[in-house]
């Protein structure tokens, strides 16, 4: 499974996770539904662009695609939290010799330096 993805891939994953968290059934998450979710956030995208990127996410094994009637519907392979845990572990391994505490210290410093 590839955890490297671009900005639009991330936008689509976040839209799907949000929809799943809202209780959408996997049979309801079509390209059109995802497009509506993305466009509602002010990021106007074309249907064909979103479909192409969603198909790429299927190839990367980040989404599952199922036929539902005449359309395809999509579901995330991992929840937002599961993918975040994997990304955090990868970050700790890559930059902190797998020491989560060292990563946490950097994150704590970052949080205290950010003004709300």
Image: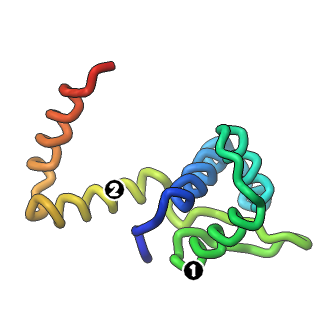
**Could you say which is closer to the camera, residue 91 or residue 43?**
43
Foreground residue, 46 or 88? 46
Q: Which of labels 1 and 2 is toward the front?
A: 1
Residue 13: % across, % down: 56, 57
Q: Quadrant of residue 58?
A: bottom right
Q: Position of residue 88 (x, y in %)?
A: 28, 56
How many discs mark residues in the rendered view?
2
Q: Residue 90: x percent and y percent? A: 25, 64
Q: Residue at x 42, y 51 (%)?
A: 81
Residue 35: x percent and y percent? 73, 53
Q: Which mark is residue 32?
A: none
Q: Could you tell me which residue is drawn at 71 percent across and 39 percent down? A: 40
Residue 53 to residue 81: above or below: below
Q: How is the image coloured?
A: rainbow
Label 2: which secondary element: helix
Instruction: Judge whether 31 appears above or below 101 on screen.
Output: below
- The answer to whether 32 appears left or right of 3 in the picture is right
Q: Residue furthest top?
A: 116
Q: Secondary structure under badge 1?
A: helix
Identify residue for label 1: 59
The answer to whether residue 70 is left or right of residue 24 is right
The residue at the far bottom in this view is 59
Q: Disc 2 designates what residue?
A: 85
Q: Residues within 10 Å of mark 1 (few under 14, many from 20)?
A: some
Q: CA distance from mark 1 to mark 2?
A: 22 Å
In the rendered image, the vertical position of residue 52 relative to residue 100, given as above or below: below
């Amino acid at each position: 499974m590839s955890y490297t993805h671009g900005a639009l891939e991330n936008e689509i994953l976040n839209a799907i996770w949000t929809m799943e968290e809202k209780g959408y059934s996997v049979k309801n998450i079509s390209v059109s539904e995802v497009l509506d979710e993305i466009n509602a956030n002010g990021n106007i995208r074309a249907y064909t662009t979103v479909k192409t990127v969603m198909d790429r996410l299927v190839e990367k094994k980040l989404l599952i695609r199922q036929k539902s009637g005449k359309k395809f519907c999509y579901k995330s392979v991992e929840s937002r939290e599961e993918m975040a845990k994997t990304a955090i572990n990868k970050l700790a391994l890559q930059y902190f010799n797998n020491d989560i505490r060292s990563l946490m210290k950097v994150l704590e410093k970052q949080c205290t330096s950010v003004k709300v």
